[in-house]
Image (cartoon, rainbow, N blue to C red):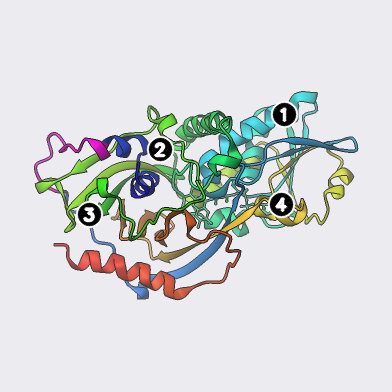
Amino acid sequence: MTILDRRLALLGGLAGLSACATQPRAIPGVADAPRLPHVQAHMRRLFDITVCTRPFRPAGPRLDTEMLGDTLVVHNYGHGGSGWSLSWGSATIVLEKALARGDKNLAVIGCGALGLTTAVLALRQGCAVTLYAKDLMPNTRSVRATGSWTPDSRIALQGPAGPAFGDLWERMARITWKSYRSYLGVAGNPVEFGDRYALSDVPFSEGNAKYYPPNNLGFAHYGSRIADLVPGGETLSGAANPFPVPHVRRSSNLQFNVASYGHTLLREFYAMGGKMEVREFHDPSEFTQLKQKVVINCTGYGARDLWKDESLVPVRGQIGWLVPQPEVTYGVNYRGVQMIPRSDGIVIQMLEGGDMRGYNDASETVDRAETAEGIARIAELYSRMR
Ligand SMILES: Cc1cc2nc3c(=O)[nH]c(=O)nc-3n(C[C@H](O)[C@H](O)[C@H](O)COP(=O)(O)OP(=O)(O)OC[C@H]3O[C@@H](n4cnc5c(N)ncnc54)[C@H](O)[C@@H]3O)c2cc1C
């Protein structure tokens, strides 16, 4: 699989796109290209730019346990660019460890994707849960994510993760995929499927080093392990191709409308009796002062300071938000930029540089020129469309 194939696989159905790389086929029964509403890609439609750091650990997320006095600490942080996509599976694994002693009175630290999901799952399992966090849901880094099903995006490096991590990853991915099933078709569309088009000026089989240069760190990719799970993709050619670009693939991808999904999780949390307290921890020893003796540490990139975990590498990512266009229900990935039409805004995100983009960059300062360049590339595409 080339670098471009992997990038495109993140955008669309992992399994189908890989298969299509070797065997292009036209879509049966489709005579003409669908007329796709245009995205109004203009700086004047920009209403926000958000930046955050992915909490990446070369060895993969930390899910082990340790005792601090009589307090059992279960870690659940370091999910890189895959936190939403692995949240339910990771929560399942850490709860197995947390509940091994039979104590169902839990503290969860953190209100991001991992903390909130873990808290909701624990409540569903009959636990009493108090969630402590410095920042609550609207202000966490998780809220600034793209919101796509990207379960192996910057999740680990092959060497440090070792061969065993693949099995753990697969379990997390499969559980999470199944769990999201129950949020499809729910009012407010917290989670939905959307068409994604991967566009390329050069054949996909040639890769596209111009936008996605190879990296020598060896990021781990496990998409082939869940090829049976996700919908397949298809190559569009001739009259079926709606774009002024020669090489096009379409797939269906799971999308998290994070504003709606976040509120849905919070409602569930409170409805099941969860308690929340705004609190910052400055040292691990403060965990032992809590009345709960089982604590699940979901502090994301915050664990670098709190737990002195210097294996956490920040991977900067920035999103420009265009005013939503409900009529646009498909996303595109073209010339190193992705556009995803979420209900809470149209995502414009520069991906050029591939997995190394933003690597070891902890800056959360907005770079307006980056977003302007992304919007310009998408605008140029539409300027050539009917
Ligand atoms: C640009 C971008 C795009 C992304 N796109 C996707 C995507 O499409 N799909 C996907 O699956 N993933 C994506 N990710 C990755 C995903 O956002 C992360 O993996 C996820 O947000 C990590 O969640 P978390 O709960 O571990 O951390 P956070 O969201 O950072 O939450 C940490 C929580 O812990 C609290 N905390 C931290 N330190 C302390 C402390 N000392 N005391 C008290 N509380 C503390 C914080 O206040 C917060 O509540 C993306 C990331 C970025 C940056």
Of residues 20 and 3, the one drawn nearer to the viewer in this rendering: 3
Label 2 vs label 3: CA separation?
Answer: 37 Å
Q: Could you say whether the residue bearing mark 2 is in a helix, strand or loop?
A: loop
User: Does label 4 or label 3 sit earlier along the sequence?
Assistant: 3
Q: Nearer the viewer, mark 1 or mark 3?
A: 3
User: Does label 1 or label 3 sit earlier along the sequence?
Assistant: 1
Residue at 49% of width from left, 30% of height from top?
174
Horizontal side, residue 285 vs residue 219: left or right: right
Q: Position of residue 264 (x, y in %)?
A: 54, 44
Asked whether the residues under the numbered discs 4 and 3 touch, taking CB atoms below 8 Å apart as contact, a structural biologist would say no
Label 4 vs label 1: CA separation?
Answer: 19 Å
The residue indicated by pointer 2 is 185
Crowding at mark 2 (Cα within 10 Å: few <14, some 14-19, many 20+): few
Main SS class of the magenta portion in the image:
loop
Kind of residue at badge 4: Ala
Mark 4 close to ligand 1, CB under 8 Å:
yes
The residue indicated by pointer 1 is 97
Label 2 vs label 4: CA separation?
Answer: 35 Å
Q: Position of residue 328 (x, y in %)?
A: 29, 55
Span colored in magenta = 20-33
Q: Nearer the viewer, mark 4 or mark 3?
A: 3
Q: Quadrant of the C terminus?
A: bottom left
The residue indicated by pointer 3 is 202
Q: Where residue 303 is drawn, which disc sits there?
A: 4
User: Does label 2 or label 1 sit earlier along the sequence?
Assistant: 1
Q: Where residue 166 is drawn, which disc sits there?
A: none
Q: Name the image quarter holding residue 346.
A: bottom left
Would you say residue 110 sits in the magenta stretch?
no
